[in-house]
Each structure stands twice: as structure tokens, then as C-alpha cells.
Image: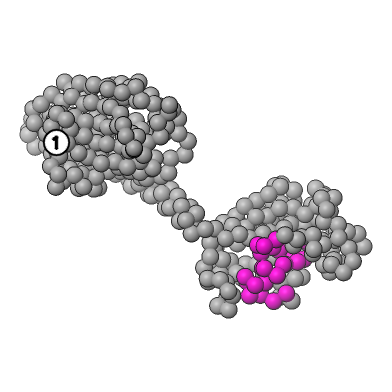
């Protein structure tokens, strides 16, 4: 702002602000900070006002570079508002914890929007000119991120890292497996041996473990957008994608629920595969039934007439790596549980009416 013209008005900036606020002039210096900021930071006014905005970094544990970029973006007119997550580092004497997750919001100051003070409340005698986009400064306000919100965001970042890690591991494993399969194929052309068949089976299991690992890395994430899914139609589609052999599907519901179709497909495919694999291991042709659960808790069940699951093993079946099938990876039912939990559902296993296993999903949103 030009000398003698309207300046950042302290009263206008800080009015009704119960959160820490800092005003940054167009030259990147701090023009004002309200009392709440000083109380939170433990810094003195003479240390803050007139200093480069970098002084703000003294109370930031992580995220200051992103905030600095956000402030510059708003000052240049490239953005009308920016939000940045920070980890605050407060002095020992400050009346808040030393580590505090917070969100900083940067918004432009424009004199024509009412920041046209004057008189005793003006900040400084000299201020920088407005930018070409009419921005006369930036307001940076801080607000605490609640513990639950911070945990959710941390969990989201951890899931992203887990998915990335699983992708890297899977990629690194695929290359040597491809080489091994190539040599196995060449060996099979030169001789016949039961040892080669065993090696081929082991390689096939490795491929399934890789696929399941990638799936697990994704399924723990919170579900974003749900859709209305007709269980009968959807299950017929899922059934067609699994090698079910002589197994049969019986649909006993016309229920429509809210779910993520991609995740739900993975859930059903794993349940179907689990029923077929355990049924075939006992030389039985399995029937899989799907129906609605009525009562206080709405939901659906997937049951089979296979060998069932003993009561003492019903908690273990959802554990990662647990399997009683010779060719199983032990990941299938873990994937089922993770998908259910990502939707906010509860899953439990009981006895089926025909002696097999029955997986019940409750807490499901049913579309009337």
C-alpha cells in the first residue's frame, strides 16, 4: 500500500477473532498479530511485527515451507484461499502443549473489502504497495485440529504410504517370479517331474499373495463415495468372475444397500472363493446363499453348506495369514474384515443353517 493511503486496520483484522491471527504485508513482513497469537506462541510483539514472515517458522515444527508457499500464492493473486496443515512447536512457557496439530488458512486482504482503517489503529508508518491483483496483504489464521481429526489424517497418510510400499514390494517380487516361471516352463519342456508341478503350485501361490497384499494395502482406507448397490444383481456379476466349479449360488434377498462397488466386489469374491476352496477340499459341491438380516441391526449374510468353522477358530479366521486350506494365502478373510470396517460395518461368523459357515454383516445402510 502506498504511504498515506488506507492501511491494514488492526481492529478490522482482529475483530471477532478468537483464533491466532497474523497479517502479512505485500513485502512479506508481518504487519500485525493479535493477542491470541502472542499468547499461543510466547513471542513478543517487537519480535514479530516488522519482521520477515520467516519469524513464523520459529513456532512451526513441520509444514512451514508449505505455508510460506501458500502465503506467496495468495499475495500474487494466484489463489484466493489456501489451507495448510502444520505441526506447531510452542515454547515451554506457552499455555498449550509443545506439539499441536493445527491448520493455517491464508486469505487475501483487500482494502475495498473493508480493511481501510486509519488513525491510531494503523500498523506502521510505511507499508508496501498493493500487488497488481489488488491484494494488500494476507491474513493467516490458525485453528487447532481436534485429536480425532488429526488421527484420521495421520491414518490416511499411513494408508497411502502402506499402499505405496506394497506396490513397490509387489513390483520387486514380480520380476524374479517371472524369471522363475520362464525357467520352470523351459524345464517342463525338457523333462517331466512331480517336483516341477510342486514348484508351479508354489509360484502360483506367490502370485496370489502379491495380489492379496496389494488388496490389503488398499482396503483399510476409509470409503469415499458410496453408491446404491442391488445385492442380487451385483452378486451374480461377482459369481461370474470367480472359478466356482460345481458350486451354486442362491439369492434370497432383493436388498439394496449403500456401498463402494469396487470394495464390495472384492469382499464378495473373497467370500465366494473361501467357500468354494474349503468345500472342494472336502470333495463337496458347495451352495452359497445370500440373504437379508432383519431386526434392530440391518444387514446381510453370506452362508454356505461347507464344513463350517469351529467356534474356537471363529475369531482367528480374520487374522492376517490364518488359513486351514492347503493352497490358501490366509489373506482372504482379512480383506473381507478390512473392507467391512472401512464401510463402518461389523462382521461376525456363525453356524449356517445347513451346517456350514455364515458371515453376517451388520450396521449396513439399507436403501428403502
Q: Is residue 315 above or below residue 205?
A: below
148 to the left or right of 328: right
- The percent position of residue 212, horizontal first and vertical second, equals 29, 40
Along the line of sight, the residue nearer the viewer: 311 or 317 = 311
**In the figure, residue 265 lies in which quadrant?**
top left
Q: Is residue 164 visible?
A: no
Q: Colour scheme of this structure image?
A: one colour
Q: Is residue 300 above or below residue 341?
A: above
- At horizontal 70% and vertical 70% (from top left) the residue drawn is 35
Residue under label 1: 308
**In the figure, residue 292 lies in which quadrant?**
top left
- The percent position of residue 72, horizontal first and vertical second, equals 70, 55
Q: Which residues are magenta?
A: 17-45
Q: Residues within 10 Å of mark 1 (few under 14, many from 20)?
A: many
- At horizontal 76% and vertical 70% (from top left) the residue drawn is 50
Q: Is residue 115 magenta?
A: no
Q: Secondary structure at mark 1?
A: loop
Q: Is residue 28 magenta?
A: yes
54 to the left or right of 161: right
- The percent position of residue 76, horizontal first and vertical second, equals 74, 51
Amino acid at each position: 500500500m502506498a504511504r498515506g493511503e488506507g492501511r491494514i486496520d488492526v481492529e478490522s483484522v482482529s475483530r471477532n477473532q478468537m483464533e491466532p491471527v497474523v497479517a502479512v504485508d505485500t513485502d512479506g513482513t508481518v504487519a500485525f498479530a493479535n493477542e491470541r497469537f502472542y499468547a499461543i506462541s510466547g513471542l513478543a510483539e517487537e519480535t514479530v511485527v516488522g519482521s520477515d514472515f520467516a519469524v513464523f517458522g520459529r513456532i512451526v515444527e513441520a509444514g512451514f515451507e508449505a505455508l510460506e508457499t501458500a502465503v506467496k500464492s495468495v499475495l500474487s493473486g494466484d489463489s484466493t484461499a489456501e489451507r495448510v496443515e502444520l505441526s506447531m512447536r510452542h515454547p515451554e512457557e506457552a499455555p498449550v502443549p509443545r506439539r499441536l496439530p493445527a491448520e493455517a488458512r491464508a486469505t487475501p486482504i483487500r482494502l475495498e473489502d473493508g480493511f481501510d482503517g486509519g488513525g491510531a489503529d494503523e500498523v506502521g508508518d510505511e507499508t508496501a504497495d498493493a500487488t497488481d491483483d489488488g491484494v494488500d496483504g494476507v491474513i493467516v489464521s490458525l485453528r487447532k485440529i481436534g485429536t480425532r481429526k488429526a488421527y484420521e489424517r495421520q491414518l490416511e497418510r499411513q494408508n497411502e504410504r502402506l499402499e505405496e510400499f506394497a506396490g513397490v514390494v509387489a513390483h520387486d517380487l514380480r520380476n524374479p517370479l517371472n524369471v522363475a516361471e520362464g525357467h520352470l516352463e523351459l524345464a517342463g519342456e525338457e523333462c517331466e517331474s512331480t517336483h516341477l508341478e510342486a514348484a508351479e503350485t508354489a509360484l502360483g501361490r506367490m502370485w496370489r499373495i502379491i495380489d492379496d497384499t496389494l488388496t490389503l494395502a488398499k482396503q483399510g482406507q476409509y470409503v469415499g463415495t458410496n453408491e446404491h448397490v442391488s445385492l442380487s444383481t451385483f452378486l451374480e456379476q461377482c459369481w461370474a468372475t470367480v472359478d466356482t466349479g460345481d458350486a451354486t449360488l442362491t439369492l434370497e434377498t432383493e436388498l439394496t444397500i449403500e456401498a463402494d462397488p469396487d470394495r464390495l466386489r472384492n469382499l464378495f469374491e473373497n467370500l465366494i472363493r473361501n467357500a468354494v476352496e474349503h468345500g472342494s477340499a472336502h470333495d463337496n459341491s458347495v451352495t452359497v446363499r445370500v440373504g437379508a438380516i432383519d431386526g434392530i441391526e440391518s444387514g446381510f449374510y453370506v452362508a454356505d453348506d461347507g464344513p463350517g468353522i469351529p467356534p474356537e477358530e471363529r475369531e482367528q479366521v480374520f487374522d492376517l495369514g490364518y488359513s486351514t486350506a492347503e493352497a490358501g494365502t490366509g489373506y482372504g478373510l482379512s480383506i473381507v474384515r478390512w473392507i467391512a470396517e472401512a464401510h463402518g460395518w461389523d462382521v461376525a461368523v456363525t453356524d449356517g443353517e445347513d451346517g456350514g459357515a455364515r458371515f453376517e454383516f451388520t450396521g449396513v445402510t439399507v436403501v428403502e
